[in-house]
Image: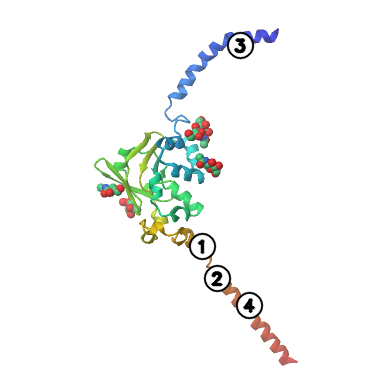
Amino acid sequence: MASNNLSLILLTLTPFLFLLLAPQTQATQAQPAASGTANLTATLELGGQYTTFIRLLNETQQIIQIQSQLNTTTQGFTVFAPTDNAFQTLTSGAINGLTVDQKVKLILYHITPKYYTLTDLLTVSNPVSTEASWGLNFTGHGNQVNVSTGVVETALNNAVREQFPLAVYEVDKVLLPLELFGAKSPKSAPSPKSSKTSPAEIPSPAATEADAAQSPSHSKNGAAGMNVGLGMVIGLGLICMGAMS
Ligand SMILES: *[C@@H]1O[C@H](CO)[C@@H](O)[C@H](O)[C@H]1NC(C)=O
Ligand SMILES: *[C@@H]1O[C@H](CO)[C@@H](O)[C@H](O)[C@H]1NC(C)=O
Ligand SMILES: *[C@@H]1O[C@H](CO)[C@@H](O)[C@H](O)[C@H]1NC(C)=O
Ligand SMILES: *[C@@H]1O[C@H](CO)[C@@H](O)[C@H](O)[C@H]1NC(C)=O
Ligand SMILES: *[C@@H]1O[C@H](CO)[C@@H](O)[C@H](O)[C@H]1NC(C)=O
């Protein structure tokens, strides 16, 4: 009986509860940077031609980092999204040869922790900080903005999204940082010839690190030297003992 009465009361009150809640719901939706308004993955997926970039963002777990920061940012983010074509023109070892840490840095080099419109980028002061340790340079030519890493330069053609807190601009080249690709660029510059060589033949930062890892041969020599020294001491001791007896 009592529960029936309660249900009745709730039923009669329900429309009023909605009335009470409705203005609050509208208020939260009106805030431009309200959480969930910018979805990086969804924005890139809508573009349709950034599947490699999405895969790398996901594989390096950076999508989680950036998306959670997008939910709370006051500065916003700008993302330079290389097309699938851009990745395809790289030599086959260029990305696969990177260590996990280098892949993370390469991806973060495509993201600035600040929202820029194309108009902002026409006159921004260089270098512009990225989420990696290195900056990007932007040059304006009339209405055209070019971005440069020191290894590659390309034009920002297409604004996939230009609305705070997230700007996404398409680039038709992967933004290769000078710090990862600079020294090797003469050898691994994309050319029809080098794209046919096997990944193993292409010098990669990973290979350089492996070379460096082999350098402890010095310490092995050191240990060997110590053994010789110890042998001589023991030998001398034996000779002395022999001389004494
Ligand atoms: C963002 O979009 C992706 C792909 O459309 C979806 O899987 C994901 O759930 C969305 N994330 C949020 C927080 O809405
Ligand atoms: C993202 O990466 C996880 C593993 O880290 C994988 O299980 C998942 O399928 C990936 N998602 C996409 C959309 O690539
Ligand atoms: C971002 O906010 C949306 C909506 O509030 C939420 O669903 C999502 O889980 C949040 N994403 C992260 C990575 O915090
Ligand atoms: C970027 O611009 C700064 C300042 O103009 C300059 O010092 C630096 O060498 C430039 N870097 C690249 C990679 O072009
Ligand atoms: C901008 O970059 C493109 C390469 O994508 C180049 O062809 C063009 O000359 C550059 N523009 C200027 C004014 O340097």
Q: Is residue 87 above or below residue 186?
A: above
Q: Is residue 150 above or below residue 55?
A: below
| Residue under the point 50% across and 37% down | 68
Q: Which residue is mark 4?
A: 227
Marks 3 and 2, how far apart in space? 80 Å
**Label 3: how many Cα within 10 Å (few below 14, some 14–19, many 20+):** few
State which mark lies toward you, 3 or 1.
Answer: 1
Kind of residue indicated by mark 3: Leu
**Dividing the image into 4 quarters, which one contains the C terminus?**
bottom right
Q: Earlier in the sequence, mark 1 or mark 4?
A: 1
| Residue under the point 48% across and 31% down | 36
Kind of residue indicated by mark 2: Ser
Q: Which residue is mark 1?
A: 210
Describe residue 209's horizontal placement relative to residue 90 as left or right. right
Q: Is residue 199 above or below residue 53?
A: below
Q: Earlier in the sequence, mark 3 or mark 4?
A: 3
Q: Earlier in the sequence, mark 2 or mark 1?
A: 1
Looking at this view, is 199 or 146 the one in front? Answer: 199
Q: Which residue is mark 3?
A: 10
Q: Which residue is mark 2?
A: 217
Kind of residue indicated by mark 1: Ala
Looking at this view, is 211 or 73 the one in front? Answer: 211
State which mark lies toward you, 1 or 4.
Answer: 1
State which mark lies toward you, 2 or 1.
Answer: 1
Some atom of ligand 2 lies within 8 Å of the CB belonging to the residue at label 4: no
**Label 2: how many Cα within 10 Å (few below 14, some 14–19, many 20+):** few
Q: Position of residue 63 (x, y in %)?
A: 49, 41
What colour-coding does the image apply?
rainbow
Q: Are marks 2 and 1 in contact (CB under 8 Å)?
A: no
Q: Earlier in the sequence, mark 4 or mark 2?
A: 2
